[in-house]
Image: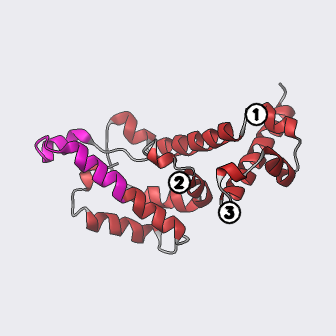
Amino acid sequence: MNKANNRRKRASIEKIEHVFIELLQTKALNQISVSDICKKAELNRTTFYANYTDIYALADSIRIKLENNLNDLYQDEITVGFNSNDYLRLFHHIKENRLLYLAYFKLDYDNQFRVFHYDTHLAEIHFHNRFIEYRIEFFRSGITKIIKMWLQNGCKESPEDMFEIIKSEYRGRMDFFC
């Protein structure tokens, strides 16, 4: 495939994803059709089916894209096994990609795939390996709910404000989270 075709394919995928994310803001997944997407994106159905088998494959590609973007955000730390607890970076990323995160949560992917990582090794040390599963779930559920609220409220507070909320709630125990 030549460069022009690659660019055209990427542009089509971006249009499809953009329209899909836009439609998810006002409709449930089962209310969105391939025809809706193609009409709004001004693309043929064959273009859609050349890239996705169905709406659910498109939804999965959105999930994968977000999770990969999030992993890329912290890849340097993951590679060297360092945890900076840089939630400010996370909140900036969420604000810059607000519609993508809203789509992710609307699709309920956060119930299947946790966006956040909990440093179990540090937790085992600090909590003497007691009730780690409960602590992990408490953290994941809490931060996920805070992020959802922030998104639903239009990200009115600054990323810095959100980071301060997280820090104050976990009272210096931020070394468990990345």
x and y percent of residue 107 in the render?
57, 50
Q: Is residue 162 magenta?
A: no
Q: CA distance from mark 2 to mark 3?
A: 13 Å
Q: Given the image, on which type of amino acid does mark 1 rest?
A: Asn
Label 3's element?
Answer: loop
Q: Residue at label 1? A: 51
Q: Residue at label 3? A: 26
Label 2's element?
Answer: helix
Task: Tell me if 175 is positioned left or right of 13 in this view.
Answer: left
Region rendered in magenta: 120-142
Residue 162 falls in which quadrant of the image? bottom left
Q: Given the image, on which type of amino acid does mark 3 rest?
A: Thr
Check contact, mark 2 vs mark 3: CB within 8 A.
Answer: no
- Of all residues, the one furthest to the left in this rendering is 128
Q: Given the image, on which type of amino acid does mark 2 rest?
A: Phe
> Alpha-carbon neighbours of circle 2 within 10 Å: few (<14), some, or many (≥20)?
some
Q: Nearer the viewer, residue 125 or 105?
A: 105
Q: Residue at label 2? A: 105
User: Taken as a whole, is the magenta stretch helix, strand or loop?
Assistant: helix
